[in-house]
Image (cartoon, grey):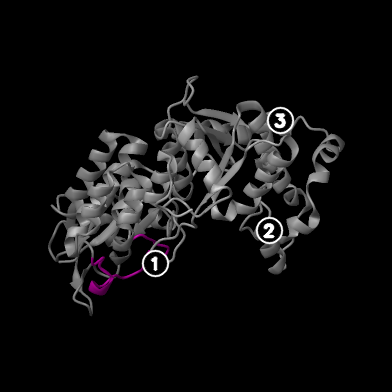
Amino acid sequence: MTDHAFKSDFLTTLSERGYIHQITHPVELDAAAASGVVTGYIGFDATAPSLHVGSLIQIMMLRRLQQAGHRPVVVMGGGTTKVGDPTGKDASRPQLTDADIAANIASIRTVFEKFLTFGDGPTDAVMIDNDEWLSKFGYVEFLREYGTQFTINRMLAFDSVKLRLEREQPMTFLEFNYMLMQSVDFLELNRRLNVTLQMGGSDQWGNITSGVDLVRRMDQKSAFGLTTPLLTTASGGKMGKTAQGAVCLNAEQLSPYDYWQFWRNVDDADVGRFLRLFTDMPLDEIARLEALEGAGINEGKKALADAATTMLHGADEALKARTTSEEAFEKGHATTDLRPGSSSGPGHRRNRNGMAVPSRSDRRKALLKASELSPSTGQARKKIQNEGVWINDNLIKDPGQLFGLDDVDTDVGAFKVKLGKRGQIVLVKPI
């Protein structure tokens, strides 16, 4: 089936916006979505208190499903988290306690409530924990019920297993069972909630097709799988990973300001694609924004940052983040300088790059003190030693480090100084 042949609003939207990588039974799924309500799910393991931007495309898929008049089911992996998904991993995940997993699920749920409408209606979202059924199976019972439905030959052929073994990294028998558990999830959800569609990233294709096959083979019911492309940035990096770590979705782990900045600073080549995937903006407006050239593309980046932040944190936080950023980076309100004789610090001189720097005794703390994030050079030194200072998005470990004009962030014409990973950025001009 070509991208232009879909009859259902759901698959047409997914195709137009770039979500589709593979579909197990495209004609059947399209017909089902065009003729009635499809209930689809995506599973999320609760390994941390927050999901990150790398999971956002999956959340948006559930949102698209609901927007098209279908029913999204969010499956929290309270059971599968106890095992750990081996996909793309060279080492086993650390095992969490039941209390840790429960706390993570409670924290993660708050994010889904921003993107989906939960309730009891025919298209309202449902959240369910797979621990409800997985932990109730006895070992012998599980093997007798499902063990004959999977062959070792086929499991070894899946990338999640094969690539791990090819890298000669150990894979525990615990992890080897993950595929069986995820497949049983699909069967159980089909029986409980009439779920007929499982979605996920392309790296989950093997797990998803196993579940599709299990439902069709054991209960002779319709079941479909759909995956999104592997999402990378234009520069080839992994989506949601930065030098400072993962871009978390919970405000407790990452401030709305830093979330806005993440989207504002995406590569020019990613603007149109990210607007289609991560916002509800109409396609014609996206086409206009991604066609902008030169400095004009910044309009598209701000529109992306505004829309993405509004969806997650609300319009007020998005506006606050944009205003703070524009005052700091464009209007220069939140800047100080290191000029000789200024109040930023005593005894300045110029180094070989022409940069105004303090005398040797004070130079280690000058940028932090100049930014007014620290009241004294002594306090500044302690903050640096405690690994809480970031300059130009880099963690500063040496209190004696010197900075020259060639170290200035060229995007803003100043040093970006931040106290703590989630602190507000202050600019320090080098003139």
Binning the other alpha carbons within 10 Å of mark 1 as few (below 14), some (14 to 19) or many (20 upward) gives few
Whichever of labels 2 and 1 marks the residue nearer the N terminus, that label is 2
Is residue 53 visible in the rendered structure shown here?
Answer: yes
Residue 23 magenta:
no
Name the secondary structure under disc 2: loop
Q: Is residue 370 above or below residue 347?
A: above
Q: Give the distance between the C-alpha atoms of the residues marked 2 and 3, in whole angstroms.
A: 25 Å
* Amino acid type, callout 2: Phe
Q: Is residue 213 above or below residue 384?
A: above
Position of residue 229 measured from the top left corner of the image (x, y, whole percent)? 49, 56
Please tell me the numbered disc located at residue 158: 2
Q: Give the distance between the C-alpha atoms of the residues marked 2 and 1, in whole angstroms.
A: 28 Å
The single residue placed furthest to the top in the displayed view is 120
* Residue at figure coordinates x 34%, y 48% from the top left: 258
Q: Give the distance between the C-alpha atoms of the residues marked 3 and 1, in whole angstroms.
A: 42 Å
Residue placed under numbered mark 3 in the picture: 133
* Residue at figure coordinates x 80%, y 55% from the top left: 152
Please tell me the numbered disc located at residue 235: 1
Q: In which quarter of the view is residue 88 placed? A: bottom right
* Amino acid type, callout 3: Trp
Whichever of labels 2 and 3 marks the residue nearer the N terminus, that label is 3
* Residue at figure coordinates x 68%, y 62% from the top left: 164
* Left or right of 120 on screen, residue 135: right
Q: Nearer the viewer, residue 86 or 375?
A: 86
Position of residue 399 measured from the top left corner of the image (x, y, whole percent)? 38, 64
Q: What range is drawn magenta here? A: 392-410
